Image (tube, rainbow, N blue to C red):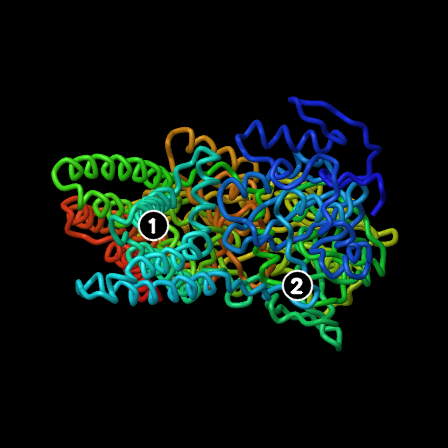
Amino acid sequence: MNKNTCFHCGLDTAFSKITFDDKSFCCNGCKTVYEIFSTNNLTCYYDLQQAPGTTPKDIEGKYNFLENAKIVEQLLEFNDDETQIINLYIPNVHCSSCIWILENLNKLNASISSSIVNFGKKTVRVTYNSKSITLKNLVTLLSNIGYEPYISLDDYSVGKKQIDRSLIYKLGVAGFAFGNVMFLSFPEYFQVSGFWIEQYAPVFRWLMFAFSIPVVFYSAQDYFISAYKGLRSKILNIDVPIVLGVLVLFLRSTFEIILDIGTGFFDSLTGLIFFLLLGKFFQQKTYSFLSFERDYKSYFPIGITKITSDGKEESTQVYDIKKGDRLLIRNEELIPVDCILIKGNARIDYSFVTGESKTVSKQSGDKLFAGGKQLNGTIEVDVLKSVEQSYLTQLWSNDVFKTDKALAFTNITNSISKRFTITILLIALIATSYWLILDSSKALNVFTSVLIIACPCAIALSAPFTFGNILRILGKKKFYLKNASVIEQLAKINTIIFDKTGTITTNKETSINYEGTQLSLSEESLLKSTLRGSNHPLSRSLYELLSEHNIVSLDTFEEHLGKGIEAKYNQEHIKVGSAPFVGYTVDTATLNTTVHVSTNNKYKGKFTFYNAYRKGLSQLFNTLKKDYDLVILSGDNAGEKDNLTKLLPTKTKLLFNQKPEDKLEYIKYHQSEGAKVLMIGDGLNDAGALAQSDVGIALSENVNVFSPACDAILDASKFNQLFNYIKVSKSAIKIIKWSFVLSFIYNIIGLYFAVTGQLAPVVAAILMPLSSISIVAFTTICTNFLGRELK
């Protein structure tokens, strides 16, 4: 490593001593790190580990392998131009303080644009400018602030994790010590008397003390670390009362054997930690068994067009894509896999991945990355590797596209946990004071029992397990939610807005008639090639009608949302869309949906669509009308108003000739009036309306509708089940409330026995994890019962 490299900031810099806050720093980088830590009441890693400007021996040269371009390419998720993205496994992530530090890496180094922590997986996804900071610099920076990444080229692939056995080791040590302490305590239990027993009693007691030391300082260290970091960050987490109980037991027992006034409570102490860890172990196994990780390959209905070896186009699901397949990517369509550009003009928007909206142009032979969005007609690509599900799910949940939709129940859970801890500490102090006056021999047991039995773990588990299981169940029923908060938002809605074309109508049964001047073969071929680049439902239907014509490579392609599409090939220019868009000014009051065509600024004619409505539409609307205001917003004319009036309930509002911006403004206005809006559209023209609504659902029917603008994706075949999905969301909120009630009942009963001195700490330690597991079982059984009611 360069002798001018600062190990505090990870960058090459000329060292110049800087004095700040009575401390000396080698460069501005390490000074910035210290400022951030000190202003947020956090202990600076450098204060604990090293003097400013010194070189840790274990870091120097350790990451030289990250200078190898081939190795770096294997590790990166995304690598294009100046932007690189990597997902690093950080074993040392423990609490909210860790999350805060890791998600503020941009304050430590301006070259880092964002960093997002997945606390459950202990990973941080970092986006940075590779021209200003290398991966080696980034990893060195993380190591120097106490969060060294675990990097193994053998294990570093999606789906593989480092197996963390530390809990098993700690549990083993606690179990071994607990068993021996219990054995050594037998003479005390049975009050065995005799010269030999009495002579060696001090030896037995000191042996129990020796066995307790590794239990307290090794097995229980995670509780101490979590409590300490929580207090440093001014957060009363659930480990604070546990640590207090352990310290009281250990110190009281130690003083007793030092002063030779008793045997202490080493059996209760080691038993307490053993059962706490045992409960934690079973909870982890429960979490693993009831995994709610959304698996794209299991159910996501995103389709993509595959070009077969004989040149035919067929729709296939993304997870069926294999290396070497040829794919057709249309305008405004997301690239699902890493691939090589073979044909077409590629202009890619990587904002889904990087958060930056600038586009990049690519030539034939260039590599394209999953998550890019094609903005210039159709392209053909060869697949480099099959889809990695977790990556696309991550794109969908990218923080860049999150709106400010409050997580009320999450906030309630956090608020309850914090207040609960304060309340329990007060109860423990008051009860202990009472027993010190009445019967001091029970005071210690009361204090520790109260702190242990009233752990708010069960309360904190209610919402995530309920929402998590509902996510999994709805996914199996082909309703795919972006995250758990969507369930909560669904339960609150009172207004449902539907798009018409492609939403309440089905493209598969649509009939089309043409009126106008006969198109030449070259014009039909150009029309088909133009339609090929669009994902609009009308374009897809018309494209299938012209299936017999050849495809040409367009010179230009542009899609005007809400108006139409235009393209050029050689000297030919074509426009397809609304009458005003193609330049047709003659009054054409038609009662049906139409698509007009002009070539070289000369009007040719129109295609008239006779829509077929989705199965169960009338029954669904009649069911929904009891509880919700129903609205249909359509960009089409009012031609089918009479048919819809007969088909739908009388109170349904029908608004036609609505542009995309009109739909958005309509939703915004009703939200200002207090409405909670659910919008259902096709995910393309309705992107703005879907994003504006409280919940936006994109309907999927064998096309790529993947869009961060929506909150959920509904398979078109399950459209008539919408009411049942909303009903399940409301039931999920009731389950959470009931689990809160059960948890409070459990704690009240437990506290009664603890405060009255009728509950030993060891029994409390056994009951505490059982309460958490019982809440998990309750929410799982109830949610699974709800799932059986869905078709």
Tag 2: amino acid:
Tyr
Q: Position of residue 447 (x, y in %)?
A: 24, 43
Query: Is residue 608 shown to the viewer in this render?
Result: no
Q: Mark 2 points at which residue?
A: 156
Q: In this view, does 629 lie to the left or right of 227?
A: left
Is residue 586 or residue 304 the one in the foreground?
Answer: 304
Residue at x 66%, y 62% (from the top left corner): 543
Q: Quadrant of residue 774?
A: bottom left
Label 2 element class: loop
> Between residues 682 and 380, which one lies in front from this camera angle?
380
What is the x, y in percent for residue 620? 35, 56
Report the residue marked by disc 1: 457
Q: In which quarter of the image is residue 537?
A: bottom right
Q: Residue 234, can we see it?
A: yes
Q: Identify which residue, 450 or 550, lies in the foreground.
A: 450
* x and y, in percent, of residue 268 in the image: 28, 56
Disc 1 marks a residue whose amino acid type is: Cys
- Please name the residue shown 74% across and 47% down the image: 558
Q: Which residue lies furthest to the bottom in this view?
A: 310
Q: Where does the C terminus fall, quadrant-wise?
A: bottom left
Left of 616 or right of it: where is 363?
right
Name which residue lies at 71% across and 67% down. 385
Disc 1 element: helix
Q: In this view, does 551 lie to the left or right of 171?
A: right
**Label 1 crowd bin: few (<14), some (14–19), many (20+), radius 10 Å:** some
Tell me how far mark 1 sits from mark 2, CA to CA: 33 Å
Rendering coords of residue 724 (x, y %): 33, 57
Query: Is 226 above or below relative to 171?
Result: above
Q: State which tag comes first along the sequence, 1 or 2.
A: 2
Dividing the picture into quarters, in which one does residue 72 lie? bottom right
